[in-house]
Amino acid sequence: MSASLFEPMQLGDIALANRIVMAPMTRGRAGAGDLPTDLHETYYAQRAGAGLIVAEGTYPSRHGKGYCRTPGIESPAQIDAWRGVTRAVRRQGGAMVLQLMHVGRAATRHNKAADAQTVAPSAIRARGTIYADGHGLVEMETPHALAGHEIAAVIAEYRQAAVNAVAAGFDGVELHCSSGYLPMQFLLACANQRTDGYGGSLTARLRFVVETLEAMAEAIGAGCVGLRICPGNPYNDMHDDDPAVTYGALLDAIAPLGLAYLHVSRSPDPALDAFALARRHFGGAILVNDGFDGASAGRAVASGVGDAVSFARHFIANPDLPARLRRGAPLAAFDRALLYTPGERGYTDYPAYPADVADVEPTAPGQTVAPGGLQS
C-alpha cells in the first residue's frame, strides 16, 4: 500500500510523526559568539509540526565558518545555546537534526575568527563573491591546501561536532555534501587536484566523505547520521563532468554504513534524475527536496520517489506548514528582502493560518511561491 505524506515513519533511529521535513536554511540570525538565541528557539518551535526539522547549516569548527551570523557547534556556549532550541522543539513534540556545514574554500576571512583558516583540498580559489557585514560583497579567497595530517584533524572535528550535537539534544546530524562546500570540494576534480590518497582517481576523491561519515557514525551511531547531496549543483564555482558516475560511486561506497537517510535535492541538470539515481544506489530512506508543493509532495511519497519530502521556502512564511497542507489552506509567500537580515522581522513574525477559517481547496502548484531560488 502506498504511503501518505501525513503517516509516521522511522529514519534510522529517528522517529517522525509525519513525512514533511523542514529543510536546512541559512537565515543569518546567530548572536554574539555565533550562538543561537531565543529567536532561534521561537523560530524552530513554531515549525515543530514538521516530522523532522533539519536545522540550519552549522559549522563544526571555526575554520568551517563561511557566512556572517551563522551558528557553530564547537564551543560549550554554543552547545548550551542549541540545547535551548532542541528543548523548545521537543516540548512541541518535534524531532530535530543538525546539519554540519564546513564551507571549505567558499569563505572570506572577514566572516571568520582571527585564528581561523580558509581550507580546502587544493589551493584553488572559487570564483565569485560572498557577503560580509561591514564589507559588502568581497571575493572568496585562495584557501590553504590541507596536508594529510590536517585532513585527519578536520574529520576529527566533524566527529566531535556530531558528539556535541547529540549533547545539545539533537536526534542526529546531517553532513552537508552539496553547494560547493568542503565535502563536495573533495569529491570533484575542479576543486581537488591532490595526488595523494585523497585525490586523483574518483575512488580517492570519495575518501574524505566516506571517512567523515564513518567517523560520525562510529561516534553517535549510523542510525543518527544523514547525508545531503545535489548531483550537478554548480553553486560556488563547482563543475562535474559526470555527476551520475560521481554520486553513484559515492552512494555505493557508503552503502555498508547503514545511514539514517539520504537527503537529495533535485539536480539543476534537466538530463539527470537525481531522485532515480538515489533509488538505484541507496537502499535506505530518501528525503527529496526542491520545487514541491503539497500535491506533488503527496504524489512523490505515494509513488515511492521519496520516503519523505523536505520543504525550504514554504516553511519560511508558513510556520504551520504541515497543518496547512493537511487542510488544503493557502500558503503565504515570504519576503525575500528579509531572508538573511538580523532580528525577528521575516523570521518569527509570520503567523499561523487562522484556526477559525474554513478549509479550502488545495493550493495550486506554485501559486504562492516568490520568484527565484533559495539556497538551502
Image (tube, helix red, strand yellow):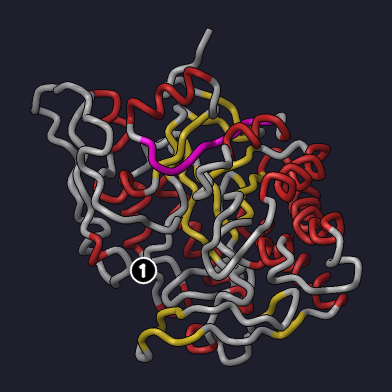
Q: Position of residue 130 (x, y in %)?
A: 45, 79
Looking at the picture, tell me which residue is in the foreground, 362 or 70: 362
Whether 302 is drawn above or below 267: the answer is: above
- At a point 76% along the width and 47% down the height, the residue shown is 250
- At a point 47% along the width and 75% down the height, the residue shown is 67
Q: Is residue 190 left or right of residue 355?
A: right
Label 1 sits on residue:
29
Q: Is residue 229 visible?
A: no
Q: Position of residue 126 (x, y in %)?
A: 58, 77
* Segment colored magenta: 284-292
Q: SS of the residue at dot 1? A: loop
- At a point 54% along the width and 61% down the height, the residue shown is 234
Q: Is residue 3 left or right of residue 158?
A: left
Q: Quadrant of residue 332?
A: top left
Whether 22 is drawn above or below 336: the answer is: above
Q: Position of residue 10 (x, y in %)?
A: 59, 27
Q: Is residue 95 visible?
A: yes
Looking at the picture, tell me which residue is in the foreground, 108 or 59: 108
Badge 1: residue crowd in 10 Å (few <14, some 14–19, many ≥20): many
Q: Amino acid at mark 1?
A: Arg
Residue furthest toward the top? 1
Q: Is residue 327 left or right of residue 129?
A: left
